[in-house]
Image: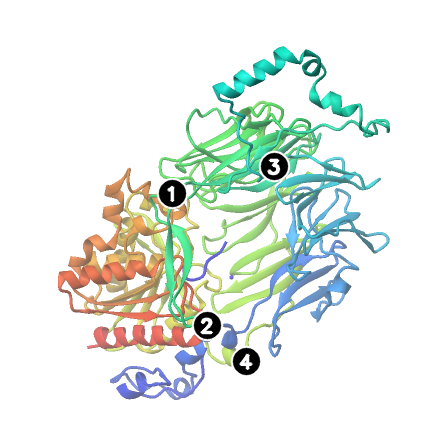
Amino acid sequence: MKGSSCRLPVFYCFQAVVLTTALIFGALLVLSPAEGAVQEATSEQSRPRLVLEKIMAGPEFIGTSPSNPVWAVSGKTLYFQWRKPGDKTAEIYSVSLNNPLPVKISREKILENPPAGGPGRLRGGFGFGRFGSQWQWDKNRERLLISQNGDIFLYHLATKKTEQLTSTDQAETNAGFTHDQKKIYFQAGDNLFILSLADRSLRQLTSFTREKQPEPRKTDEIQKWYEAQQRDLFKEIFRLGFEGMEGFRGTQNLLPSLGQTTRRKPFYLQENQRLILMEPSPDEKYTLFILMEEVPGAKTTIVPNYVTRSGYTETISSHTKAAENPQIYRLGLMNSENGEVRWVDYGQGERLINPRQVWWSPDGQKCLLAAQAEDRKEAWLFLLDWTTGKTTVVENVKDEAWIGPLGLTNVFWWPDSRHISFISEQNGYAHLYRLAVETREKKALTEGRYEVTWASLSADGQKIYYVSSEVHPGERHLYVLDLKSGKKTRLTSLQGMNEFYLSPDEKTIAIINSYSTRPPELYLQPLAPAAQPKLITSSTTEEFRSYPWYDPEIVTFKARDGVDVYARLFKPDLPHPSRPAVIFIHGAGYLQNAHRGWSTYEREYMFHNLLRDNGYFVLDVDYRGSSGYGRDFRTGIYRHMGGKDLDDVVDGARFLVEKYGVNPQAIGCYGGSYGGFLTLMAMFKTEVFKAGAALRPVTDWAHYHPNYTVDILNLPQKDPEAYKQSSPIYFAEGLKGHLLICHGMVDTNVHFQDTVRLVQRLIELGKENWEVAIYPVENHSFRTTSSWVDEYRRIFKLFETHLKK
């Protein structure tokens, strides 16, 4: 499930004074230490103070970090997008190794030194045209194939010349080089074509059509009688055929046959069917395609939009509810000569299998296919015989809970076309493996109580670069593994969270690095263990830098079942006499927030600084189900969300009481999306929290998205108990503390209907200590500063009112 900001990364300053209630909840909302707090020392009095209007403005106050770094094919220049402080909009910048000073660059200039990208299936996008561009290099990085605005272009690096290959009204998409590099393929409409780069001849490989399939000819008894009479009376005509008689009078046979033309059997597409992948086999005799079929009767939720340009209520179509699978995916092979279609046989009987991705071996002789069971409990790597559609299992991963994002991923072939590598958490943590395709001999290349999240083979095939959390669960670093010696070497040293972008010549690494007190910035570093990274960008505003942001301590505490739970801890310099605390519950479920980098929840991080300034302890918990801590931690919520994850939140509160003297009668909690759901469970199922703010919360998992929920809770019609014990709406009678619910009315992720249904339940139960704030123009992630300010003003008021007594 997505949180308030997902993926696949403050303020204005005044002297701190005690404010009256009117000022605290007035239009400006300047927040200060609570009444009765000890007067700060002179050095503390000059400390800047946080204001909601600033910290909720987001990038306008913080600044905009660099993004989308892409190396040029030369390996000496890096392109990236950046809104430099003072700029009105984001622009494309370049930085060279010789002169590491970012400069704006035009798209025309970029074409002189085009962006790099791997050959084959590795592609990139950088927004070159009105609709953006996609590009692919040939194997030798001499020619660049560019898809732009629905047409295809070929750029020759040696001559710096570009030629347009197509210019049609119909868009050509999904372009790539064929295995022999002599042709290109592309999709136009529902069909795949191959264009020769030598003579520009064009060949259609598939025959998909949306024309209505002709009805079979039907004849009644009377028509049959007349046809039989005609045959008996006019034998010469029937011997020659009516078409033959006409042919003697025509002129169509004056010219010789210029080529052999065959007509493929057409495949008739239905209205509910769509092609989402088409690719030729290396021998070009077959086309692989994935057919997505919308399940008849699957009903999507309609989201009303009340504040519109037209003044009328409009509707937005959203996802189905958990019980309904909206699509079925099938992988097929069409014969390029006769149009015959064969569906891939996974050898799993009637079990529904979803194809994921295919990889051709470097020699073009093998095809590797990834697939996953519809129930999410099993995944495979198959060898696919593309002439028959038969498959052979190469690797099989099972999980009694569900296969996670790192369950079987990051697959790549070795140059010998005999070995593959992949990341799998089959042994408890995500690690890198090498497997011999023919013998199935498998070897773990990394091991330990940490996760490998990315890996790539070097150009010479002698090393593997990979990213792991071996140093600390809250850090990511780049390593290189020498395949001959087995020695691994750490290449980076920047503390915090890092994203890595390796140059094509493998001599330099671009790093997007952030720290808990600093948003992401771009660095360049030679690819050597002792090399020093050089800072390239400075993105934050002067106003943001003027505040001494608190560096939260990464702490661990023991959950009741003995598992170590990680959390960020914000300790106040001057705790309020009530010694209140707030526990923040991050969204998305499978997400890590107790790390050493800049938080995905940047506004919440700044709000925690504000709470700390006002005498609160704040604990930001990576509860059970969060990412970064291995398979068992991830699946700890299977069939019971609001079980171990809620226990971890409650145990975090106990940790604050026992170790830091927090008042057990003055603890609150809040969070959005999954965090909103868990806040409701905390308020309904425990008496630990005196106040809680549930933002855009899931209240009934049977009404959420199937692609997320079915992983964890199975299907509601097959496992109703899992849904009942996991959904807050069934526990609303337990509310005793003070509850605030905030929800955007045009939320297409967690529907506003979730809150409406819970409100009706609270009304029927006669509960009084709750309130709802609605945001008519907001989706799941808020866009307007005014909505952010209003929401967090209410959250702060909730805590000030009920935790400080």
Q: Position of residue 512 (x, y in %)?
A: 58, 61
Q: Quadrant of residue 485?
A: top right
Can you identify the residue that label 3 sits on? 208
The local secondary structure at tag 3 comes to strand
Can you identify the residue that label 4 sits on? 542
Disc 3 crowd rating (10 Å Cα; few below 14, some 14-19, many 20+) is: some
Q: Position of residue 313 (x, y in %)?
A: 38, 67
Which tag, 1 or 4, sits closer to the chain's start?
1
Horizontal relation, residue 440 to residue 648: left or right: right
Can you identify the residue that label 1 sits on? 297
Can you identify the residue that label 2 sits on? 309
The local secondary structure at tag 1 comes to loop
Tell me if residue 103 comes above or below residue 634 in the rendering. below
Q: Residue at x 32, y 48 (%)?
A: 563
Looking at numbered disc 3 in the image, what kind of residue is underneath it? Phe
The local secondary structure at tag 4 comes to helix
Horizontal relation, residue 142 to residue 279: left or right: right
Please report contact status of discs 2 and 3: CB closer than 8 Å, yes or no.
no
